[in-house]
Image: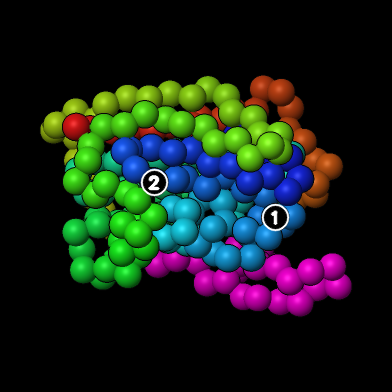
Amino acid sequence: MEVSKGCNSGVYYRPGQYEYQVLDNANSPYGENPRQSAGSLFFCMAPRVIPRVAREWNEGRIVCKGTVIQHWLNGVKVIDFDYTDPRWREEIELLRIRGAELSARGGALKLQDHGADVWFRNLRWRTIPAGEVCPAKTLHPCRFHLRRSKKKRRCRADAESQGRRAHADSRPALGSALRAVAAFSS
């Protein structure tokens, strides 16, 4: 997926309000809140890394099996939890308030449009076989630090200092691969 400057979009999956957030964190007010940033389980759980900037391809992946949910961003697992685990009680309550049907399985991919340009390619869907294991591993969300800038208040993650920041004008070649994968089981 690739987003335009200021873009806010998402991919809905499973019945109810399960949303993988697709966002230009740097130029959208939603990027100031980690629970609404790119790769998040929108409104409920923050991811542990920051994506590339607007106009660069990002790779997303959603995995759901039983009560385990995983979000991947650019090859890194950014959310991984089992919503029956009491450690995630507060986040699950937010998901429930938002309208998620926790006992529902299956679903369909729905691409969200808030009017800004967003591109998706190579979307794939598969059912996870009954014998395939998707064990949940406790991941701690990325620590976000709010800093003042001359233009506006922004959320920046520790990942930024590790060289993951890019230039807005650098765009990958057309052959750049994106795999947006959603895997579900009933």
Q: Which residue is mark 2?
A: 17
Q: Look at the picture and state if 23 lies above or below 174.
A: below
Residue found 13% across the figure and 33% down from its top: 131
| Residue 58 figure quarter | top right
The stretch of residues the image draws in magenta is: 139-163
- In the depicted view, which residue is nearer to us: 167 or 123? 123
121 is within the stretch colored magenta? no
Residue found 55% across the figure and 36% down from its top: 112
Q: Look at the picture and state if 70 lies above or below 35.
A: above
* Disc sitting over residue 28 in the figure: 1
Q: Where does residue 154 sit, x and y in percent of width and height?
A: 70, 68
Within 10 Å of disc 1 (Cα), the crowding (few <14, some 14-19, many 20+) is: some
Q: Kindly identify the amino acid type of the residue bearing the numbered disc 1.
A: Ser
Q: Residue furthest left?
A: 131
Q: Where does residue 62 sit, x and y in percent of width and height?
A: 40, 40
- In the depicted view, which residue is nearer to us: 41 or 1? 41
Q: Earlier in the sequence, mark 1 or mark 2?
A: 2
Q: Look at the picture and state if 74 lies above or below 108.
A: below
Mark pair 1, 2: CA separation: 21 Å
